[in-house]
Amino acid sequence: MLRARWLVLAALSPLVTGCAIVRQDQVGIKRTLGRIDPKPRPAGAIAFLPGFQSVITLPARTINREIRLALPAKEGVNVAADISILYRIDATKAGEILEKSGADYEEVVIIPVFRAAAADVSARFYAKDLHSGERVVIEKAIKEQMAQVLDTRGFVVENVLLKSITLPPGLARAIEEKLEAEQEALRMQFVLQREKQEAERKLIEAGGQRDAQKVLGEGLSPLILQFRSIEAFRELAKSSNAKVIITDGKAPVLVQP
């Protein structure tokens, strides 16, 4: 009797066969009488028998899931953060994902694993680290901790991005004051360095003037001074203008009449 029914179904199947379309960014899985066929179907048309078979499609593209979460910090405060999780399924394990996690795998697996990993990682860092270069380290640590659980279940975590961070008001002001103090310290350090360089410049300039005067003083011997006086007398003698010269024989003093 059962065999006859199957023969009837086989004879009628060309007339009642359904067709499901799997898009380019999807992977198709056929289910027959409640049993999952682990072989994934690529994009295209998939024939099935309505009432006995169905085709389930899963997205094979990268999914961006944004979550707002209160992250615990090392000092005991909670930091509000908007976080993006970029992930995709391993298309070759689509059947296994449906069997173990179901079609609602994001709420069942992805989100709980993310919440646990994010809380565990953020608790190792201070709240201020979320605004500093440690941010990249935190993102990488969350991604790696999620991958330890999700890789074996057929999910690929591509990236975790901390987007918007909101610190508690008191802590935010304390961080701002610290940054302002650091900037002021850097400014004062620059001013002191500039003043130091200016003082060194003045010392070098004074030393140069002192050395020049020393060399000049050493070079002005009595004979040189007498020679310079003779030259001055000679130049005055060349002039045709009337003049009165008072001298002690060493240095001329010109008096205009």
Image (tube, helix red, strand yellow):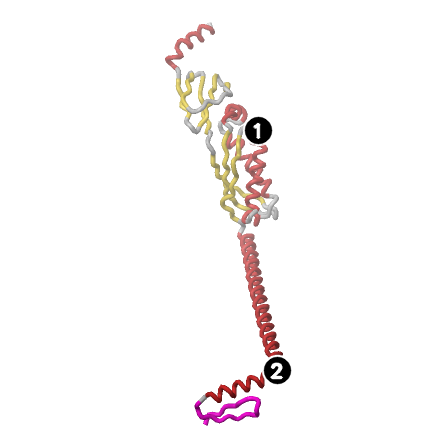
Helix, strand or loop under label 1: helix
Give the side of residue 22 with respect to residue 203, left or right: left
Give the total of numbered labels.
2
Few, some or many residues within 10 Å of mark 1 (<14, 14–19, 20+): few
Where is residue 24? Give x, y as percent.
Answer: 42, 27
Residue at position x 61%, y 44% from top?
124
* Amino acid type of the residue tagged 2 in the rendering: Ser
Write down the quadrant of residue 20 in the picture: top left
Marks 2/1: CA–CA distance: 98 Å
Give the side of residue 48 with respect to residue 172, left or right: left
Residue at position x 54%, y 31% from top?
109
Foreground residue among 207 and 191:
207
Read off the residue under disc 2: 221
Write down the quadrant of residue 192 in the picture: bottom right
The image shows residue 228, relative to residue 121, as above or below, that is: below
Read off the residue under disc 1: 152
Q: Which of marks 2 and 1 is nearer the N terminus?
A: 1
Residue at position x 52%, y 26% from top?
97
Where is residue 228? Give x, y as percent.
Answer: 55, 84
**Is residue 235 covered in magenta?**
no
Residue numbers of the magenta segment:
240-257
